[in-house]
Image: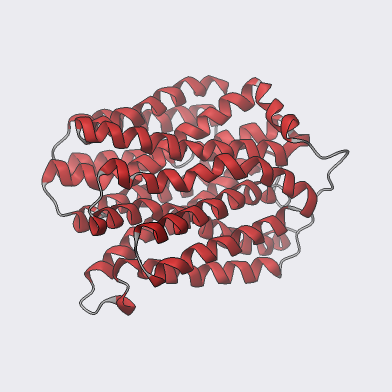
Amino acid sequence: MKDNKMLKLIPVMLCFFAMGFVDLVGTATNFVKQDLGLSDSTANIFPSLVFFWFLIFSVPTGMLMNKIGRKKTVLLSLVITLLSLLLPIFGENYYLMLICFSLLGIGNAIMQTSLNPLISNIISGDKLASTLTFGQFVKAIASFMAPLIAMWGAQAVIPSMGLGWRVLFPIYMIIGILATFLLSLTTIKEEEVVGKASTFSECFKLLGIPIVLLSFIGIMCHVGIDVGINTTAPRLLAERTGMPLTDAAFATTIYFVFRTFGCLAGSYVLAHFNHRKFFLISVLFIAIAMLLMIGAKHQFILYTAFAMVGLGNSNVFSVIFSQALLSVPNKKNEVSGLMIMGLFGGTVFPLFMGFASDAFGQAGAVLIMAIGAVYLLYYVNKIDK
């Protein structure tokens, strides 16, 4: 039985890798900003646009799952994601990239809403949070590989297929095709929807449950910090040390490497230790890192801060998501839709950070992220032990 579960988890985890494609937006934004000569506030429209679609598609996706099932919904998301990765191969003009990031956001909104609860059809109970965290570990591998591949493409002596940094897109597209193929061949038994499917208003009424609402805001803050550090870390390093942007992109890799390590460690810790204490330690890492980033000018201190945010933010999503999902077990699809709608924080935070950094430098952007860290400290006491 355990071996059967493991076989089912392999294609699902490959889908988590495909879910990580969305994190290329930070790296891509900085290269597009440089190539097209955009300001911070204009360039930040790209990550904001990606996560805007979580507001629109998450709840409808929860309802769609009730009709066609979670696995078919994940497959739909993969097809949309593959289309988004195909477009940049043909060029890099402003409007083409807007369409690319929009499709990437739509595909990822559908994927995150459906893939997380799909795992609950394979793993359940107190092991759910640790399994979701392992999925985030796999997702983080795709995240930290993105800037490395983009830097390789940009700096290659022989330009990669003439695409430069955009070689990232066809490489990830091939992996996405493999994930689609393997999941389509995997049989996963899903529980039947009992009673009448929820309407839009009934879905949103779930926000009237305090833990669901607080978790929704917590997800907004988590992804705001995630997308924020993804786009701001290279700019902060370039501003404080004078490093060229192509080299400063390594700052994003540091964040994702430590987030990846944090997810791997968290998949074990969450299965064996107190969730609340672990969450508190994670958020304290984020808060201390924000204080370091506001005033630090030394390269090593900034790298340390990026690593601390990576470690701290690595398990926040899994704890909050599982807390919300298990609080209303008979409405998992609907709660999943609401939680993933919280990824709209990836739109809100970068917009305010762009304006703050244009006005006050990158320290202004860090202060916006710090607001999210303060809320997560408040959320600690809402977590079941």
- Residue 26, how many percent across, how many down? 36, 50
What residue is shown at x 60% (from left), y 53% (from top)?
A: 111
Measured along the vertical axis of the image, is residue 151 above or below residue 51? Answer: below
Who is closer to the viewer here, 86 or 75? 86
In this rendering, does residue 271 appear at all?
Answer: no
Q: Quadrant location of the C terminus?
A: top right
The answer to whether residue 218 is visible is: yes
Figure check: 299 above or below 373 = below
Q: In this rendering, would 108 be left or right of 333?
A: left
Extreme residue in the left direction:
242
The reply, left or right, for residue 156 in relation to residue 79 is left
Image quarter of residue 226: top left
The one of 24 and 360 positioned closer to us in this rendering = 360
Picture coordinates of residue 84, whole percent (x, y)? 50, 62
Residue drawn at (71%, 70%) of the image: 185
Q: Quadrant of residue 156?
A: bottom left
| Viewport quadrant of the N terminus | bottom right
How many numbered marks, from 0 up?
0
Identify the residue at horizontal 49%, vertical 69% (top origin): 173
Q: Nearer the viewer, residue 152 or 120?
A: 152
Looking at the image, the residue that sits furthest to the front is 95
* x and y percentages locating residue 147 in the rendered image: 32, 58
User: Residue at the spot x=62%, y=37% of the render?
Assistant: 322
Measured along the vertical axis of the image, is residue 362 above or below residue 36? above
Q: Position of residue 46 (x, y in %)?
A: 39, 49
Q: Residue reaching furthest right?
A: 195
> In the rendered view, how is the structure colored?
secondary structure
